[in-house]
Amino acid sequence: MKIVMIGEAGNHRGRLEAALGPTQEIICLPREAASDPAWDAAIASDDAVISLRLRREKAPSFRLLHVPGAGLDGIDFEALAPETAVCNVFEHEIPIAEFVLGSLLNWEIRLDALRASMSPALWSDTYRNRVPHGELFGKTMGIVGFGRIGRAIATRAKAFGLRIVALDVLDPGDGLADRIVRPDQLGILLAEADYCIVTCPLLPSTRGMIGRDELAAMKPSAVLVNVSRAELVEQDALYEALAENRIGGAVLDVWYRYPLGADDQVAPSQFDFSALPNAVCTPHSSAWTSELPARRYGFIAANLGRLLRGEPLLNLVRPAAATLHA
Amino acid sequence: MKIVMIGEAGNHRGRLEAALGPTQEIICLPREAASDPAWDAAIASDDAVISLRLRREKAPSFRLLHVPGAGLDGIDFEALAPETAVCNVFEHEIPIAEFVLGSLLNWEIRLDALRASMSPALWSDTYRNRVPHGELFGKTMGIVGFGRIGRAIATRAKAFGLRIVALDVLDPGDGLADRIVRPDQLGILLAEADYCIVTCPLLPSTRGMIGRDELAAMKPSAVLVNVSRAELVEQDALYEALAENRIGGAVLDVWYRYPLGADDQVAPSQFDFSALPNAVCTPHSSAWTSELPARRYGFIAANLGRLLRGEPLLNLVRPAAATLHA
């Protein structure tokens, strides 16, 4: 078995080599190999392929497609040979949860304002006139979508003494949330939450799920945090609620428009959220850490080791047909 | 029994009234009543006194002195009548722990820089050139002093997947820390810690405990956080280590000089730490929250209810003599 890294995955070849040892054959193919059959001859039926994308009519036969991320929207499953298993990898729930808790703590503490108030000349008056800040403790966090990311946020939030109200189709029944509500009970979550965290996937049923009525159901002091997909929240309703201070504020890390090519210039929204004092806008960075690729490729290396030893694969999205009929 | 609130405590009279009901008699005495016997006639032997200070040769007899804070350095214990019990109140470990985790998350995520990188005009280039930030997950936190504050920090830090090395005279043996070291093993903690949090009290044995040698024992990337007392760390050695980038940075909330009166102007240190890019300097604000007084006076009200009902008092620093000999 050799390992075929396609496109951006090839940037992490060194990590796999370090984990698997120099005897493991690894080749890198260009980005085009994900969609153009011209490179198919380089892929053997015993190989494992690592690629974020695989788009074509019919892919060659190989043992495993390991997607080096969580999203599967770049993969044409119908093009894959039946004997190809598919795995993905997460790990981004860790930095996203850190980003959410860090944003909320900063919302309450306003560290940048505290820092700006300090200098040798300001100190005595600043100290005498200290302005109290806020706390997370005892407040309620609503989590819309209680999957891997929502649960990683809840695990950390519980340690701060936050009460968790989580919305999902299923109740995991493990007590991590203090209250679980169904999707048709979003109003309960919105009314109770001091912080409303949007972590559900974008689906036809969830697009625009937070609009004018839902924002009006939130507490006037509540903070909306979106680390999932912008289109879950209607941008005109959100801009209006923030500009008119009808909610406390928002932390927005995901956007309505992204640059697709290397040179195009688009705006992140039809509104300038970044000019609002109560909107903390960040450039889709919640999971963008130095540690994430190392952790993801460490997971992939371990999974390739399992494949080589004939052990069950982790994060199996689609088993190989042989496994299915075993 | 009536309740006597002296000095600053009187600002919170409304909170006690709300908690105890209108039938409970409460009086407020001026700040001077803490040191001047002229007001003693207003205090009866059945009363409870709430005051941060009580300094005099001989205090009148009363049932309970409830200090509305943790520090007991304002109380002359020898002046108290033997039948006077003393209680204090904490709760500041909650905002201090939130401040420490918030500071560390902000250290890794640099939310203000992310925010500054967002605008309609910047977005496309910012997105294409995102700079990865750091994570807490998997790093090691050293906690110097594993008391109430250190443990509140550890409880939250564990939820982020941080490894905890705590230094204290006693091993609580409850597994909250991954490793406990003794005070003579500070070097072990300093060598292992990515974040070194100073939370121990200032005593003759701890003054200047972190000096040139200890800073040199830290990792070059490590961050020192001081939320206890400035004098635990030698200011010249700390300034030098930060200015010469021999440690990663520092979060400093406590200072070497404080204004004592209403008008005097002092500098927080003989060095201008706030001008260093790797020092996050804040004005002794880690516990300065709107929620803290409400929580403290809620605790005091509950403790006064215990006294009225003859139940055991919480946070008893010194029992009444009658209890001692009961």
Image: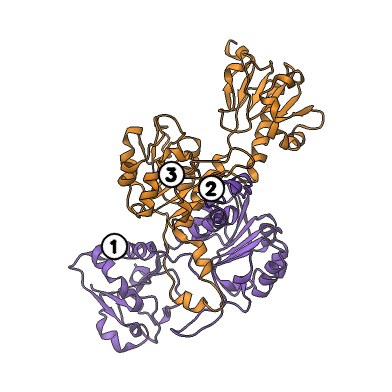
Chain colours: A purple, B orange
Viewer-side label of 3, 1? 3
Question: Residue B219 location, x and y as percent?
Answer: 32, 50
Measure how far apart labels 3 and 1 are at the Cα level: 40 Å
Give the residue type that dot 1 points to.
Arg
Measure how far apart labels 3 and 2 are at the Cα level: 13 Å
From the viewer's side, name the closer residue of A59 and B290.
B290
- Judge from the rendering whether residue B266 lies leftward or rightward of residue A30; answer left or right: right
From the viewer's side, name the closer residue of A298 and B114.
B114
Whether residues under marks 3 and 2 lie with C-beta atoms below 8 angstroms apart, the answer is: no
Q: Which labelled disc corresponds to residue B197?
A: 3
Q: Residue at coordinates 49% horizontally, 81% vertically from top-left?
A: A259
Q: Please, which residue is most extreme toward the left here?
A: A23
- Judge from the rendering whether residue B88 lies leftward or rightward of residue A302; answer left or right: right
The residue singled out by tag 1 in the image is A306
- Judge from the rendering whether residue A228 lies leftward or rightward of residue B6; answer left or right: left
Circle 3 chain: B
Whether residues under marks 3 and 1 lie with C-beta atoms below 8 angstroms apart, the answer is: no
Viewer-side label of 2, 1? 2
Give the residue type that dot 2 points to.
Glu
Quadrant location, the N terminus of chain A: bottom left
Q: Residues within 10 Å of mark 3 (few under 14, many from 20)?
A: many
The image shows residue A243, relative to residue B139, as above or below, that is below
Give the residue type that dot 3 points to.
Ile
Q: Residue at coordinates 45% horizontally, 71% vertically from top-left?
A: A71
From the viewer's side, name the closer residue of A103 and A13.
A103
The image shows residue B171, relative to residue A181, as above or below, that is above
Measure how far apart labels 2 and 1 are at the Cα level: 41 Å
The residue singled out by tag 2 in the image is B98
Q: Quadrant of residue A53?
A: bottom left
The answer as to whether the residues below labels 2 and 1 share one chain is no
Q: Looking at the image, is mark 3 or mark 2 earlier in the sequence?
A: 2
Question: Residue B132 location, x and y as percent?
Answer: 41, 66
